[in-house]
């Protein structure tokens, strides 16, 4: 009986196996060809983990933290930020603090691996001098992996570098308001009672010339603006006046409302005109740490350690009328403008708020600099806090770009 049952089933099993093999051999090439015809990995992979927030955490003093990748000899330094060369106090301690996110691990950049990932690609920063501060840290770190790196200022870049071993360019385009603006002197001198010397015309719907024509060159773009949106930069004698289609907006916009309109227009332009495959970030504000007055009112930042968490709101909450309150207020408006877009927030504000100890302060490299300009409690010592910014940006690029 078993022999008969086996003989009756065996032909059916053979037949089904042959059918399966036929279907497999027919369909597999179609599937493979369909996937192999897609272009090389140029599309950025959106792979942020909802549980990973690199921006929320705390600073830990870590005596075993690796030394910075670069020193005062980096050829891309800007003198006023070269705190090692300028003998800034406590640089060893400043660079012993490590940012530890609450939800995940922040890896230190591997310059060789990162440049390998970015081979034949370019990274651009667009914004104010805090983006330049960021860039200098980035260039000095990446140079470790390619000592043949050369200064690069083509395509209207303010400054940058080319890494020939990897065919990678990293550059900064200075556009402090992002929107186009120009000086218009007062037309009539009949009455000077109002003290007005002229205006800065801001075209809210027109990106600045410095970056409008270069966005297709970059595979990663990091935007910022904010520090120039203040009455210290544009007082009542030389105010910002907002225009649309070359005509003054009526009724006139105040500073913050004008800023909001510029944000919205620049974001719209980026969404519409910058290539879809470009990975886009918007860096939120890097806070100032002037204590006891503004930059031009003997403000100081001679601190020897980071602020405590309980001190942050006293310095930065907009409800406290201190000199450092504007960063969070501007961030709120930036976040509103970015809602629903594919521009990623690079929220470096909170981690930077702690670091009142890490500015150039009085160590500016020129003996008359402080008497002329005041202490620098806005930019950051290099090496220093911007190196952590680099680690975060690089990890986010890795998360999005994937591997080849």
Image (cartoon, rainbow, N blue to C red):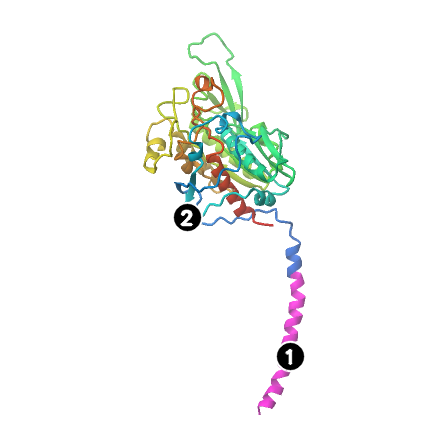
Residue 220: where, in percent of width, then height? 57, 40
Q: Is residue 294 above or below residue 171?
A: above
Residue 333 appearing in the image = no
Q: Is residue 398 left or right of residue 324?
A: right
Give neighbour class at mark 2: few <14, some 14-19, many 20+ (Cα, 10 Å): some
Residue 192: where, in percent of width, then height? 44, 9
| Tag 1 residue | 14
- Say what secondary structure mark 1 lies in: helix
| Tag 2 residue | 103
Q: Which residue sits furthest top?
A: 190
The majority secondary structure of the magenta stretch comes to helix
Give neighbour class at mark 1: few <14, some 14-19, many 20+ (Cα, 10 Å): few
Question: Which residues are drawn in magenta?
Answer: 1-30
Residue name at image x 44 percent, y 42 percent: 64
Question: Which quadrant of the view contains residue 19?
Answer: bottom right
Q: Is residue 233 above or below residue 10?
A: above
């Amino acid at each position: 009986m078993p022999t008969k049952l086996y003989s009756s089933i065996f032909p059916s099993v053979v037949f089904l196996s042959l059918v399966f093999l036929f279907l497999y051999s027919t369909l597999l090439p179609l599937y493979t060809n369909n996937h192999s015809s897609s272009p090389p990995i140029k599309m950025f992979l959106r792979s942020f983990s909802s549980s990973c927030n690199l921006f929320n955490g705390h600073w830990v003093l870590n005596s075993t933290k690796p030394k910075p990748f670069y020193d005062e000899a980096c050829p891309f330094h800007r003198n006023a930020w070269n705190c090692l060369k300028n003998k800034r106090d406590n640089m060893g301690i400043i660079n012993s603090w490590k940012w530890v996110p609450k939800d995940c691990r922040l890896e230190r950049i591997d310059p060789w691996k990162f440049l390998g990932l970015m081979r034949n690609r370019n990274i651009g920063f667009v914004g104010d001098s805090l983006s330049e501060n960021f860039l200098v840290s980035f260039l000095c770190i990446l140079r470790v992996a390619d000592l043949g790196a050369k200064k690069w200022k083509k395509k209207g870049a303010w400054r940058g570098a080319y890494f020939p071993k990897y065919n990678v360019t990293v550059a900064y385009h200075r556009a402090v308001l992002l929107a186009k603006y120009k000086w218009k002197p007062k037309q009539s001198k009949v009455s000077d009672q109002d003290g007005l010397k002229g205006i800065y015309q801001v075209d809210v719907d027109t990106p600045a010339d410095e970056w409008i024509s270069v966005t297709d060159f970059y595979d990663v773009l990091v935007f910022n603006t904010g520090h120039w949106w203040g009455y210290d930069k544009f007082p009542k004698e030389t105010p910002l006046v907002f225009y649309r289609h070359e005509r003054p907006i009526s009724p006139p916009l105040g500073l913050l409302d004008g800023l909001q309109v510029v944000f919205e227009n620049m974001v719209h332009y980026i969404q519409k005109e910058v290539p879809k495959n470009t990975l886009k970030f918007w860096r939120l504000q890097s806070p100032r740490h002037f204590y006891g007055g503004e930059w031009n009112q003997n403000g100081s930042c001679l601190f020897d350690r980071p602020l405590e968490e309980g001190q942050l709101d006293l310095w930065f909450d907009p409800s406290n009328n201190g000199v450092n309150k504007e960063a969070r207020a501007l961030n709120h408006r930036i976040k509103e403008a970015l809602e629903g877009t594919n521009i990623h927030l690079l929220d470096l504000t909170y981690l930077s708020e702690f670091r009142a100890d890490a500015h150039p302060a009085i160590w500016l490299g020129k003996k008359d600099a402080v008497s002329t300009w005041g202490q620098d409690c806005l930019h950051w010592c290099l090496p220093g806090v911007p190196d952590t910014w680099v680690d975060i940006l690089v990890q986010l690029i890795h998360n999005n770009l994937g591997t080849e």
